[in-house]
Image: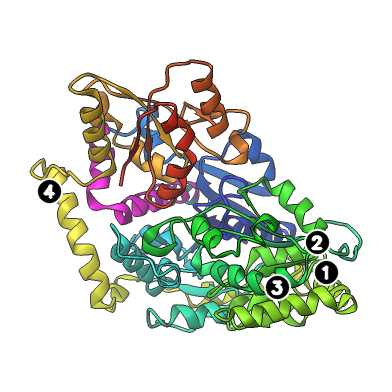
Amino acid sequence: MRIALLSHQWPGIRMGGIGTAVRQCAAALAGAGHDVHVFTLGIPHELRGLTPPGVHLHEVADLAARLRDGTLSPPLAATINAGGEGVYRLAVGWLLCAAVLDAHREKPFDVVEGPEVEALGLPLMLNGEFDAPVVTGLHCCSAIAHAANDAEAAEGRELIAALEFAAIHLADGVCAPTRAVVTETQRFMAMREAVSIVPHAYSCPASSFTPPPADGPMLFVGRIERLKGVERIAEALNLFLPRHPKAVFRFIGPDTASGPDGASMGDHVRKLLLPEISGRVEFTGEIAHGQIERELRACSFCIQPSIAENFSMTCCEAMAAGRTVIVGSGTGSVEVIGNAGLAIDPRSSGDLAAAMERLWMDRALLVELSRQAYDRIRAEFSPGRMAEQRFAFYEGVIARFQRERTQRLRTLPVGIAGAILPSLAALTGALAGVHQPTHTPGARLLRIMGTHGRGRPVNVVLYGAGKHSARLLAERHLWESRGHRVVGLIDDHPRFAEGGAYLDLPVWSPAAMERRVTDGNQTPAVVLSTDTYQDQFWGQTARLREAGVAVFRLY
């Protein structure tokens, strides 16, 4: 079978389960003899080696890269942002789907699958000429994440949710790795058809089981956000750590703006901790995948009490290392861990502390559950077994496939059309040259540059080498036409520890930028290019600000 998989993530670039799940799925299907193609955005050279054997990787340039390469006109690139972040994400989906269409013309695909997150497969579903079924795989839609994080309304959020719901509603087939994520998604939208449960595959390293070390650290691995249950972890640590002076805990992963009033969740968690235990709770930030594997082997057990979860790849990684996990009941993690871990009420810090106590004090139970976790991930989610299930699902979708999709458009819920209309109006106005948007990221940056430069051209550095900066740089002609320049980026991801480049711009780590200032190098103003990590980045620029470097918030 010839299969196309869409993904906006890839392992090693940023922490995210979708990229890992797609890579594991592609590897399993290719290992079963299928012709598998993954379509994703540009991947750093050093990470291309993670492509599984037999998988064809198609890298697609995003809007900023196309603008840099001269294949997209600057006004059109900037106009996309007039429709808001949802339209920008839809544009990325169009670019990926255009690459699928090109490959399909050379040799047809039997089936295409994309995640509901970012609605990547939606352009193919709206193409009346595309003659292959398009499947949507449920992961954890944006509506679930925003509700669990108690996030305030923000630009494009309603449109993003509507596009993702449309990608579910219009799909030729829908699958999910766990029943829990189906139930959670149904809280926000009614499903047009039944969802097939097809767990993700997970390929484990060839290593023998090693019992967890005595008094090893306890780990959380993932984004520091409310959705992942980190507040309950802090409260449970206040109960548990004072009774066990040898115990230590590590939070591994990036901060998020899911704290109270949209502030740093990492700072909020630190404030929740009792002063007498704070020295035994470490926040490592985002670290390289190889380092995470070493941390897992060295730990006693993991704690992942998410409020909502589909199919936790972190649980899989822990189980593959022979480590048991405490998970939140009622989530997909329970279906992953089975009887090889402990499930607790994710909203009860008391229940979590009791489970931590049980594993810490009962060495025999800890070793037994760890061994069961090691065996379960290799037996239940082996690539060969999961490839058979996914192939059977695809066969059923292909057998039922009806090329005529336009009838489904008439059944879209009214709310989806209502969310799309404002962005469509703004986008049309910008294309007509009537409406000059002032709310886009580029327009905000231009105002900052104008104020800072007092009428003279200025150079700035963006803090963040990811999708937020990529969206921002799609509007670069707004400021470059006035002589302003973005001359580099700052990013704390491990892959930039020794420098590097993103969209042909040099990238410095925060420490490297601080050294430049200390050494007396002239440093341009810094603009925080993200709304998601704005408070975190503001805190990480404290030394730059103290040294006299101008730092601006974009949002």
Callout 4 environment at 10 Å: few (<14), some (14 to 19), or many (20+)?
Answer: some
Q: Which mark is residue 374?
A: 1
Task: From the top left corner, tell me how far across and down residue 519 is, in percent.
Answer: 53, 16
Q: Which residue is mark 4?
A: 429
Residue 198 quadrant: bottom right
Task: From the top left corner, tell me how far across and down residue 531 is, in percent.
Answer: 37, 50
Label whose residue precedes the other's in the sequence (4 or 3): 3
Assess whether residue 162 is covered by the magenta stretch.
Answer: no
Q: Secondary structure at mark 4?
A: helix
Label whose residue precedes the other's in the sequence (3 or 1): 3
Label whose residue precedes the other's in the sequence (1 or 4): 1
Q: Which residue is mark 2?
A: 321
Give the residue at x 57% y 31%: 511
Asked if labels 1 and 3 touch by Cβ distance under 8 angstroms, the answer is no
Label whose residue precedes the other's in the sequence (4 or 2): 2
Residue 543 located left or right of residue 70 = right
Dominant secondary structure, magenta: helix
Vertical placement of residue 452 versus 264, above or below: above
Give the residue at x 38% y 79%: 188
Q: Which residue is mark 3?
A: 240
By what rule are the colours in the image chosen?
Answer: rainbow
The amino acid pointed to by label 3 is Phe
Q: How many marks?
A: 4
Residue 149 quadrant: bottom left
Label whose residue precedes the other's in the sequence (2 or 1): 2
Q: Nearer the viewer, mark 4 or mark 2?
A: 2
Closer-to-camera residue (88/60)? 88
Q: Is residue 34 visible?
A: no
Q: Nearer the viewer, mark 4 or mark 3?
A: 3
Q: Secondary structure at mark 2?
A: loop
